[in-house]
Amino acid sequence: MPLYRPSELKNFLIENGVSPKKVLSQNFLIDGNVLKKIIHVANIQPSELILEIGPGPGALTEQLLNSQASVIAVEKDRDLCRLLPRLSEHPGALKVCQADIMDFPIHDTLKSLLKNQQKAKVVANLPYHLTTPILEKIVPMRDTLSKVVVMVQDEVARRFTAKPGTSDYSSFTVFLNYYADCHYAFQVKRNSFHPAPKVDSAIVVLDLKQPPKVSDETRFFNLTRTAFQMRRKMLRRSLIGVYPKETIVYALEQLNMDPHTRPEQLSLEQFVELFETLERAISQK
């Protein structure tokens, strides 16, 4: 039964005494064309291992299984979780886990299932209230994941894929670009869901990569977050809480950066250069 058809989904939910829960950000896809496009941009291959976060009633899960992928479906909603095993026609093709993804041992679970240097993919319609913390958790997992394909709010997708010098560019954009090549795949209109949310959505594709080498990742991301907390101020002022003013001015001069530079003007590579110059200057004092 193709649950991407509105009438089929509604009948399915009624028959099983289930309804979308607002507290879990549940908006179920009812557009078969969108599902096909997700499978296409995710480049699903037979026998690939896919982690699906928040599968809901299973419309996307069904498409993943039809692509001959193996799926680990992590669903917090107990009512929906008990209904997902119906989708698996082949033993072992679908593993359903009733859990909060923020508590689920993603890395260890994938490691135990992957063989011969294989990597898994994440394909998911993320719960919108947890988009950022979920991505913070999974994008550093390059040793087990090759690609992350997620549905997020459209305005959030544009921030994730923003370019330096634009108003949407943020410290989280820098964070994502540190771990992945990010691109905006396509928009999904709000009427493609039941119930329809108040905003449009979009698919973002993150191809995980070897991050640039920095001497201390924790301090590096502290620098980028601090810089964007006062994004309208010049770096020589916004970073004073992290480095002495004279050190900041010295680092900008060493890199031939305009002393009036603001955080949204710097690319990931420039942030790395600035950080390493600042760290060297501090260590030499």
Image (cartoon, grey):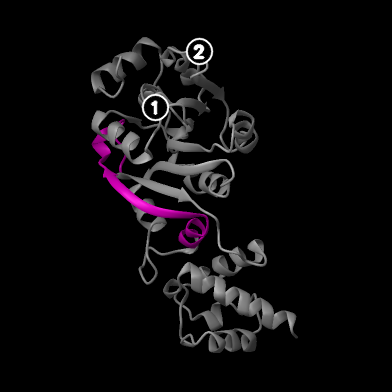
Most foreground residue, 227 or 117: 117
How far across and down, in percent of the image, does residue 15 sit? 36, 10
Q: Residue at x 56, y 23 (%)?
A: 98
The quarter holding residue 138 reads top right
- How far is the residue under mark 2 from the one under mark 1? 15 Å
Region in magenta: 172-198
How far across and down, in percent of the image, does residue 254 sit? 56, 87
Q: Residue furthest top?
A: 15
Q: Residue at x 63, y 89 (%)?
A: 246
Residue behind mark 2: 91
**Relative to 15, residue 219 above or below:** below
188 in the magenta segment: yes
220 in the magenta segment: no
Q: Residue furthest front?
A: 116
Label 2 is placed on what type of residue? Pro
**Relative to 180, residue 118 above or below:** above
Looking at the rendered image, the quarter that the N terminus falls into is top left
How far across and down, in percent of the image, does residue 80 sit? 46, 20
**Relative to 22, residue 186 above or below:** below
Residue behind mark 1: 64
Q: Are marks 2 and 1 in contact (CB under 8 Å)?
A: no
Label 1 is placed on what type of residue? Leu
Q: Residue at x 46, y 26 (%)?
A: 47
First of labels 2, 1 by sequence position: 1
Q: Residues within 10 Å of mark 2 (few under 14, many from 20)?
A: few
How far across and down, in percent of the image, does residue 220 sit? 61, 66
Direction from residue 129 to residue 31 in the image, left or right: left
> Which labelled disc corresponds to residue 136?
none
Direction from residue 132 to residue 66 in the image, left or right: left
Q: Residues within 10 Å of mark 1 (few under 14, many from 20)?
A: many
Most foreground residue, 87 or 93: 93
Give the SS element for disc 2: loop
